[in-house]
Image: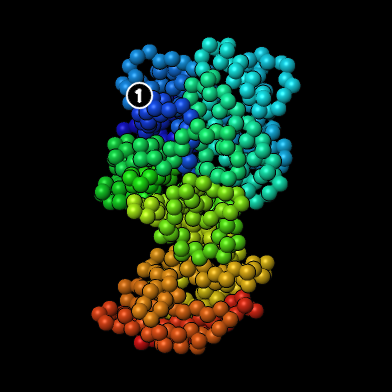
Amino acid sequence: MKEQKYPVSTSDFERIRREGYLYVDKTAYIHTLVKYGVFYFLGRPRRFGKSLLLSTLEAYFLGKRDLFKGLAIDKLEPEEWTAYPVLHLDMSREAFIDKSSLQNLLEGHLIYWEKELGIIDIQATAAQRFVNVIRETANRSGKKVVILIDEYDSPLSASIDNPELLRLYREQLHGFYTVLKSLETHIQFCMLTGVTKFGKVSVFSGLNNLKDISLSDRYAGICGITEEELRSYFSRGIKGMANKYGWSEEETLEKLKYNYDGYHFSEGMTDIYNPYSLLNAMADKKIGSFWCASGLPTLLSKSLMEKDYDVERLNGSAVSVSMLENISVYSTEPEALFYQTGYLTIKDYDPETELFTLGYPNREVERGILNDILRIYSSGDGDVSGMVTLMRESLRKGRPEEFVRLLKSFLSGIPSKLRSKVSKYENYYHTIFYCITSLIGLDVNAEYNTSEGFIDILVKTPDYIYVIELKVNGTAEDAIRQIELKNYADPFYTGSGKNIYKIGIGFSKSTHNIETYKICKD
């Protein structure tokens, strides 16, 4: 049987179709988009298929019908297709590191279009030149123009920690995008995609005719892979992976679901798999970390640390629709950022309160984000995974002394430049401890609720229970005394049949490490 080709390194629709790569048919969505609207915005995480969607739209509007043979839209639109001129602008092809970056990118596109149109008298701003290009394209072709803008927000995301540069980019983009509204009579279709939808920054103030479909039930599966699509299109790859590891096909599906499924982009809760990770897993015939491999964006880690945010609150946080739909560059909430960038997803929706509950979509993302946060909060170097494995074995085998020694050794490797921030980030030690114990992969609860109060960390293994209390600038004796006074271990004495350890840990702000610890076994 011929090996299936997976498009892990291309998002060009024409190439995918002509060179025999696997294509999951999303063209029924295109039919609906074109039928019911003109101006759209779609927000999805990086590497989630936005570029492929726009590439497919471009081929459709250019009338390349041969590429769509056998696809849904070929049957939905049996009549002759009309070809339209397309202006496709990819905003992700620039690093956006200085004042000229955005101008250079726009200039490059404008020069190309102007050359194609034979426009030589250029005495205007980028926005006015864009107006001229659209009008001239429509006039010369006798048809309305299709405008596709991929990753519209790249300049803003790249400069969000540089107020001066952000202000400049915002002004440039506002003028450039606003012309789309004024030229509606010349536009057949327009779609902008991005990771984040920035609110309160005036970029879209002139584009109030954009329909945001990011949280729409109708378009929940427009990017990514649904459960039905997985079973229909990936059966060959599933069989190949199952044969390689000696799994059944159902076991293989369970592993793929555990690691890559779990995204929801509307209150209808349609399950969506991460397409980038799934395609790579099929191509490599292994379960690995693909989407998270590039690391946590600086913007997200900075948001967590500067807001002194409890990382464990991310999983299970409740937010409003308005928070998910709009990000302000002046006050960026971690929950909204983590959702729009794909590190959190919708886990539940309450129609009465109109609140969404967010959480990690799958194990790949949870493991990836905790690993990255741990590196950021510690040293950024070293073998975090190896250290976590040793700690897991210590707890599984009932060796808490060894666990504490490993933790102390890890903390001693944190550079002084990070240690100096401990006084600023009150949750610093708690975050490190939470990430480590969560990555261990055991039954871990942070801030476990009992009738007497909250246990800092509760860890359960098949044979042991660890009740752990942390004290910053306090002693291990203080921590043990609190465990005893609050009777934290009492709920676990009856019926568990497990050995129970009470661990008190005292951190020092002067040494930035474990100063004292005490372990009591019941």
Q: Amino acid at mark 1?
A: Ile
Q: Quadrant of the C terminus?
A: bottom left
Q: Is residue 111 above or below residue 331?
A: above
Q: Which residue is mark 1?
A: 73
Q: How is the image coloured?
A: rainbow
- Residue 341 in the image: state x and y as whole percent: 50, 48
Q: Residue at x 60, y 31 (%)?
A: 178
Q: Is residue 444 above or below residue 61?
A: below
Left or right, 158 with respect to 1, comes to right
- Residue 77 in the image: state x and y as whole percent: 34, 19
- Res 472 visible: yes
Camera-nearest residue between 508 and 411: 508
Q: Is residue 462 above or below residue 148?
A: below
Camera-nearest residue between 51 and 168: 168
Left or right, 65 with respect to 432, comes to left
Within the image, what quadrant is residue 37 found in? top left
